[in-house]
């Protein structure tokens, strides 16, 4: 009897371990599927499913708003690589949020796995994964040298657009050697995404370059031109479905509001956002859309779609009460208000550092830290973007 009892305990323990492991996977997976069952969204049933677009992979180049772990692989000590980042999904993945990003919800809506960070790739992944993410926090569209010619210096040299393009080329050299069918044909159904500009402009603003000065020195047109040239290279690689994001409401970011707090001439909208910053974002987006229009005329066989983050975010602000948000321009993870200016200027109290405070309900905040959105905000932004791009990619209804 004792021997039989021992076997029963061993079996139950094994089953319990397997159940716990499965339960953890289900928690993370169900969290990533929030786009299917979003909370407090009166339009949830109207959100189309990108699976109908037939995307078989996602390839992404960009900045922190779509960085799913590349910068954290290179620098495990950065704030987003540790708690409280990732607290909503119970894991600090390197995403600059309490949870998932817009790119994650787009992937789930397309019925694809979360996109693998390039820095996490191994040779075994080259022909097996459903896309690669090359985005890197702090990345600029222009190189360090190009910005220096405009008297803009970078404190850190993070992989810019041209570096990420080099990674993409390296990846596809291996990918195309591993796939059995023609590589170009394999990429025809992939979704290529890109977002740049915020860090180029942010670096200029922090160094006291005025918005008028930035416009006069052609920074915006140069940023857009760099994106256009990169898109041409991607199209030559075989891309036929491209999603290019504009910039969002920079004037609503806690860091932008704080930096303008000493500017007595600054004006604000009804949400407390800095008007000049948001007007500048509009200007960038207008120049970008003109550039995309030119590309469409040159490549009529390619679907080049504009990702309107500006109006997506405006819709979140306009409908914030029905969406369940209570704080629009304050960070969930922040320092005491009296220390905020010093913390931003000297970067000694970023989210996660000693002295920062985390709000008890991140889902009620649009911003997680001074510059990045919460998972809840990312979900709502993704919902809007998906509804907007679905017909433009001529997906089957």
Image (cartoon, grey):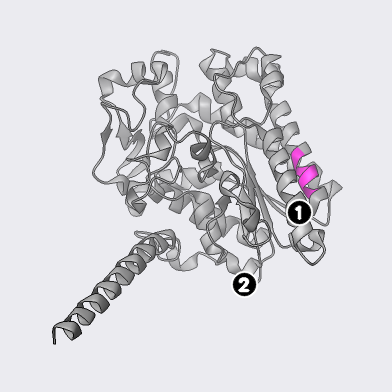
Whether 7 is drawn above or below 302: the answer is below
Kindly identify which residue carries mark 2.
Answer: 397
- Hey, which quadrant is residue 238 in on the image? bottom right
Check the image and report above or below for 6 versus 187: below
Q: What is the secondary structure assignment of the residue under circle 1? A: loop
Q: Is residue 57 above or below residue 325?
A: below
Q: CA distance from mark 1 to mark 2?
A: 23 Å
Going 56% across and 63% down the picture, which residue do you hit?
Answer: 112
Going by the image, does 265 lie left or right of 305? left
Q: Do the residues under discs 1 and 2 have CB atoms within 8 angstroms?
A: no
Crowding near pointer 1: few (<14 within 10 Å), some, many (20+)?
many
- Residue farthest to the bottom? 1
Helix, strand or loop: magenta stretch = helix
Give me the disc on residue 239.
1
Instruction: Residue 364: give x, y in percent of width and height.
Output: 30, 46
Q: Is residue 231 magenta?
A: yes
């Amino acid at each position: 009897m004792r021997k039989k009892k021992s076997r029963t305990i061993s079996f139950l323990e094994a089953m319990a371990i397997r159940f716990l492991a499965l339960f953890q996977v289900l928690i993370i997976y169900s969290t990533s599927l929030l786009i299917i069952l979003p909370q407090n969204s009166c339009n949830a049933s109207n959100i189309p499913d990108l699976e109908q677009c037939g995307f078989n992979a996602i390839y992404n180049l960009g900045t922190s708003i779509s960085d799913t772990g590349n910068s954290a692989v290179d620098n495990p000590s950065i704030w987003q690589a540790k708690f409280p980042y990732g607290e909503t999904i119970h894991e600090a993945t390197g995403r600059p949020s309490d949870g998932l990003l817009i790119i994650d919800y787009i992937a789930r809506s397309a019925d694809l796995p979360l996109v693998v960070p390039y820095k996490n790739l191994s040779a075994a992944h080259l022909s097996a994964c459903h896309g690669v993410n090359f985005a890197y926090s702090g990345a600029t569209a222009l190189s360090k040298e190009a910005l220096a010619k405009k008297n803009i210096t970078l404190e850190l040299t993070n992989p810019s657009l041209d570096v990420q393009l080099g990674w993409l080329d390296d990846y596809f050299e291996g990918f195309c050697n591993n796939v059995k069918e023609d590589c170009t044909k394999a990429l025809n159904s992939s979704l290529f995404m890109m977002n740049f500009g915020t860090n180029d402009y942010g670096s200029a603003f922090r160094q006291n370059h005025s918005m008028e000065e930035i416009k006069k020195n052609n920074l915006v047109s140069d940023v857009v031109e760099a994106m256009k040239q990169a898109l041409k290279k991607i199209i030559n690689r075989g891309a036929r479905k491209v999603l290019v994001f504009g910039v969002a409401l920079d004037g609503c970011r806690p860091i932008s509001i704080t930096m303008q707090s000493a500017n007595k001439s600054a004006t604000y909208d009804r949400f407390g956002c800095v008007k000049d910053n948001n007007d500048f974002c509009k200007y960038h987006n207008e120049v970008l859309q003109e550039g995309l229009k030119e590309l469409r005329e040159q490549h009529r066989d390619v679907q080049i779609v504009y990702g309107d983050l500006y109006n997506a975010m405006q819709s979140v602000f306009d409908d914030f009460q029905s969406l369940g948000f209570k704080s629009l321009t304050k960070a969930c993870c922040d320092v005491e208000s009296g220390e905020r200016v010093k913390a931003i200027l000297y970067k000694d109290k970023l989210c996660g550092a000693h002295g920062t405070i985390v709000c008890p309900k991140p889902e009620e905040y649009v911003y997680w830290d001074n510059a990045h959105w919460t998972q809840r905000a990312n979900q709502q932004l993704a919902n809007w973007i998906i509804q907007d791009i679905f017909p433009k990619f001529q997906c089957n209804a």
